[in-house]
Amino acid sequence: MNTLEWGAVFRWCVVVQAWAIPCQILCSVLFPNLPHRGVLFAKSLAVLLVGFGSWMLYAWLHLPFDSWLPWLTWILLCAGTWTLWRRERRRGYIAGQSNQPAAEGLAWPLVELVFWGPFLFWLWVASLQPGVFHTEQPMDFMFINSLWNSRQYPPQDAWLAGQPVSYYYLGYWLLTTVAKAAAVQPALAYHIGQATWFALLIAGALGMGGSLAGLSRRRFDWVAAGVTATAVAVMGNLQAVRDQLAARSIGLERLSHQLDWRPLGVGNGAEVPWYGPEWGSWWWWDSARVMADRGLDGGHLEVITEFPFFSFLLGDNHPHVLSAPFLFLSMGLALQWLAGERGQAHSHSVFSRFGLAATLVAAAFFMNTWDVLSVCGLLAAAAVLGAPDIDTWRRRIGVFGLAVPTMLAVAAVMVVPYLLTSRNQVEGVAFNLLNPSRPGQFLLMWGPLLSGAVLSLWMLHRTRPRDWTGALVWIGGAPLLGLAWMLAATFGPPAYRLSAVLGIDLRIVQSLIAERWAFGWIVPVLLLALLGWSCNSLRQVVNAPNPGYPGAVLHAVLLTGGLLLLAVPEFLFLRDVFGPLARMNTVFKFHYQAWILLAVTGSTTIVILVRGSQRFAGALAVGIVSAVFAVGLLYPVSALAGKAADASRPPSLNALRDLQRYDPARAAAVDWIRHHTDPEAVIAEAPGISYRPETSWISGLTGRPTLMGWQGHEAQWRGRAFTTQAAARVDALEGMYVRRPVDEIVALMRLWGVEFLLLGPIEESRFAVSTQRRQELQSVLVTVWSMEPYLLLARPDAVLRG
């Protein structure tokens, strides 16, 4: 990495550290009952409050998105924090002054070390392969560039000129806000931001695990913190074991066939390095495609089974990655409520926590909309179960009816500007009648965390009075209800609806349902049984005068939430553009959240039980689960070693470094456009093709809008309304490049607001541009830049900078 890159890293670190200063004070007010007083959440809280606050000023007051806007928000945050701290100090509600004993704080150097250590580590990982040209990296980079260029609300979609962004973009906004404040260009901000989010995830997991396990002693449990952070952000699934064995010619063909595992290629064991298959083969990708569904004909239907470490390794700065660290703020707030607010009913911090809860819900809505149910459910449960001096279910329901709708209403008001510009991507809720998860695939993905969930249930159960009748009712009743629901769906309206949607006979649909569920009932029934057990444990913990340990209620809530997120896609999914049977996105987004929740509960359970006195059977169970968790570390170790062995040299954080090295003409075009055109100037290029980084590259790499970017992705973001928009824009592009008479080109460009037109290999191939047509375009337009094989033409009245 060169001096320019290290300078950008330094400015970025200064910004994050400065923003965190008032939030460390704010966390001591908001989280006084947590063993670390919330200090490990301070940087996440800072990024969220400054970034979201800047968006509020941008969207509601229409302040321009310039570098001073985040600093204005930070000044307002400092003023608010100071005011709140003084009032709480005067009333005696600051930790250490209330009637409750103060939680022990953490040493400042250690807090900084556990954040900046992972940050620097992931900077190194990202620098090994800095390009942003595979999978959906071009899309993520496009959004960052678009927001960087959008000074006025609403932010513009660079892949659909003239239209606002219609995607949950708050995560991109937060990253771009830090970049603006630090004066770090998007090409460097992409990887520095990714390293920051990895460190935020680690810090959040540390804070949650150490608090949950250490609450009883009011001391932070560093062992539980480390195990939790490893399980959340580092551990992988068991697919890596298959990959390693296959690379050494141990294919396990018979077992793979029996368990319905996807076939793998078998390598030559004598030639593979110690870490397994070669990096260039993308063997590590298999772990994110462990499960698969089947179409009507039995053909493959994609199912995404990502987990946090894979996401960071892949390098896509997607909404599910950017939202993950902020789930721990919701968990921390929930634990604060459940740890007790007695004596603080009139404290200003109580209202501040309510405001933070509403902010977290609002942020989840357009950071990653799929997180809303988890965030709302977690905060609602904590608000009701942790309300002071309320010990009956009747009163709890009353609190729920007042507090939760108010919180949702405040959150909805916050995001009104986003709601006015976004488009619904969902086509409705569908019943999953044909694709229950297959047991072998499910256990390959969820073996470690599912074993942790069972261990957590056993731990909660053993501390409660033996209510076997209630337990059997819940454990047996939930699967019976699920199977009854499936029978009703098979012979009721859901099957009729599916028959109509697919256009096939109802009897064929019903026979397919019976065939798929004859052996597919195992995973849904298992999940419902565990969910019933978890609900019963939650009921017992809430009703018990002594819950066993102070974090037991939140432990049960998180466990129930994680199992519910796993169970829902077995029965329901949200329909989208991928088809009437595709539950890919529902499985992906629900399971991703479940990974985080179950990783927290499973890892803290292991530490709590290891420290407690155990009989032989209990100790054996803990040992087995711990070993399964340890096997999950094979994936990050081997994948990182493979990536390091295949790294491009020298390391760099510049997302455009590979472009500059291997395609200097395109790099020169990007550089010229950045320096000589207005940030919102519209540039015509060939319509994009999803997952093809060589298309829509001008708009993606510069943030200058184009008429039509990646069409498949725009269709996902905008739904059915996009079809009409796409047809008109493609027709206009064809008119500009080949179809319209040359004397109409300038008028057509003005009609669509296009100032520049790119001619390159993609455009010439897509529109069959002849040499004569190229000359005609040059005769009516101005050549402003050229380098073989690219030519950039401009309208005669186009405005150039510099």
Image (spheres, rainbow, N blue to C red):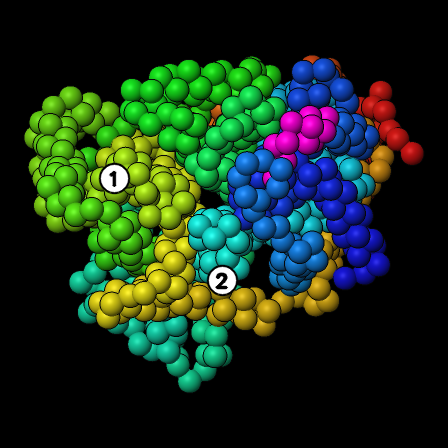
Residue 671 drawn above or below residue 778: below
Residue name at image x 45 percent, y 71 percent: 277
Near mark 2 (Cα within 10 A), the count class, few <14, some 14-19 or many ≥20, is: some
- The CA span between labels 1 and 2 is 28 Å
Q: Give the magenta range.
A: 83-95
* Percent x, y of residue 274: 48, 79
Residue 634 drawn above or below residue 556: below
In the picture, residue 797 is in which quadrant? top right
In the picture, residue 644 is in which quadrant? bottom right
Residue 349 drawn above or below residue 16: above
Instruction: Name the residue carrying label 1.
Output: 540
Instruction: Name the residue carrying label 2.
Output: 223
Q: In which quarter of the image is the N terminus?
A: bottom right
For residue 221, side relative to residue 17 (left or right)? left
The amino acid at mark 2 is Val
Q: Farthest residue toward the bottom?
A: 270
